Image (spheres, rainbow, N blue to C red):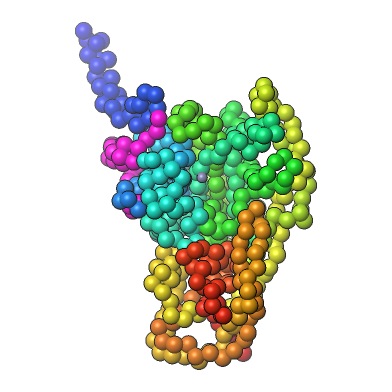
Amino acid sequence: MKRTTAILIFLSPVLLFAQIRLPLEKQTPPIGTSNAEMVEYLGKITAASDVLEMEIAGKSHQQREIPVVFSPPRKQWKSENTTVMIFAQQHGNEPSGKEALLMILHEIYLNPKHYDFSKLNLIFVPMVNPDGNEVNRRRNGNRYDLNRNHVILTEPETRALHKIFHKYLPQVTLDVHEYGFRTWLKEGYIKDFGEQLDCITNPAIPETLKNFALNEILQPTIQSTRDRGVRANRYLITKGGLNDFVRHSTTDINDGRNGFGIQLTLSFILEGLNPLGKSEQIWQRAKYQQTLIENFISQCQEKSAQIKKLVDEIRRNAKKEYPDSVVIVADYTKKYSHPLEVSLKKTSDFREEKVVLPDYRPEPEKLLTVSRPNAYIIINPTQQIIELLDSHNFPFAKFDKKEKMVVEIFRITGTDTLHYESRDTIIPAGKFIRTQKEIPAGSIRIPTTNERAIQIVQIFEPQSFYGLSHYPEYRYLIKGKEFPIFREISQN
Ligand SMILES: [Zn+2]
């Protein structure tokens, strides 16, 4: 009797404690966590835990909540810690990253000492795209691909994410996705790279940051993931067959990786293999993602002091020293091409085979560099432009009265098409004319003499591969005879 009571007393807190279960655990078979299930679950575990805190970061296009979880709670954050932001499911039909983050949060809730994340301030956004999640669709409720929205920031989901970023300025970010296996199916191979991790690739991002991301975080994370028996590789992509060129992730700044990387951040993308569809093997897919993400966070924990020192120093310097010039066009050309041996599975018997990809292009070539102007001047800015500047937290000022100044105006003579990264990008043809111009009151001045310089130049230069005019919403910029964003030149 005595013994039974003792066991009951011992068990009851455990039983109470175990009442909160992962949404996926309650489903037979597990099919995936809905937005409502996730919001309810996160509300419960964060209320029950001293080391978790939840806030609603924003709402989706269709008014669904986007929760953000902090660990430890922000009051316990240490200023010497590295801040890491991990977000998942920008693409609604890639759910395993969300499930993996919920699994990690569940471990933290069950046993706060399960991981040693003592040198980190962690931010989790498990479901960036709730509208897409509910209907298993890539895009949000406004039919926008959120992972191509980090330049124009028109969508509430990406705006919410950038708001979090600007508030806490994490030194490290990780964006979690999934990929399909069909790339080389016609040629008899399954692309099973397991977990694919990539880092910042935009050529304007400082080399020290890129090298650290690759050598000190990406490579050791892949190695430690393999050591735990999970397949992992650096992210590779091709739009063609085995003989076509393969490259790493895009140099564009409109995704969740370079979008933060261009703001001087150690930014990463993770893609887990999605073998069949929405809910097939969802538990296993999430477990693989969880393994890599845990190893990723462990690398950040181990190197927290180094990361903090490096990123903060680069950001501090960028506030007072600005680049003379900025790369605005780059492509994975043949310049650095060489063969690469990879391991693929044969469709016939699933056996692994070494295959040599003849045209591996590891680095983008810098193709057009421009000198940095002091500022960009926008005549008669639309509401859309003002919202863009606000969403990016760019510094800008309005002209109270008209002013004469020396500017460079891009005279448009036609258009050119760049076929880079296997897509067509239209840029205006023409040339800059230096002239004195009267700038009307109400115009906007966006200075480049700040830590956002490289991002501002890539977004506002007329011939930039990363520029505004590639988006249908901003195509009007290249319709006239001159580009309506001028370069302000210092007058010596
Ligand atoms: Zn994706």
Residue 298 visible at all: no
Across and down, in percent, residue 102 comes to 40, 37
Q: Which one is in front, 16 or 176?
A: 176
User: Is 196 in front, or is 6?
Assistant: 196
Q: Is residue 415 left or right of residue 263?
A: right
Residue shown at 62% from the left, 33% from the top = 192
Image location (x, y in percent) of residue 489: 58, 83
| Quadrant location of the C terminus in the rendered image | bottom right
**Residue 357 belongs to the span the image colors magenta:** no
Magenta segment: 31-60
- Give the quarter of the figure containing the N terminus: top left
Direction top: furthest residue? 1
Q: Position of residue 288 (x, y in %)?
A: 52, 32
Report the label total: 0
> Is residue 31 shown above or below 149?
above
Taking 488 as reference, is 154 above or below it? above
Assess whether residue 40 is covered by the magenta stretch: yes
Q: Residue at x 54, y 31 (%)?
A: 275
- Is residue 442 something one can see in this rendering? yes
Residue 330 versus residue 299: which sits nearer the camera?
Answer: 330
Q: Position of residue 477 (x, y in %)?
A: 52, 73
- Residue at 35%, 26% in the rendered image: 27
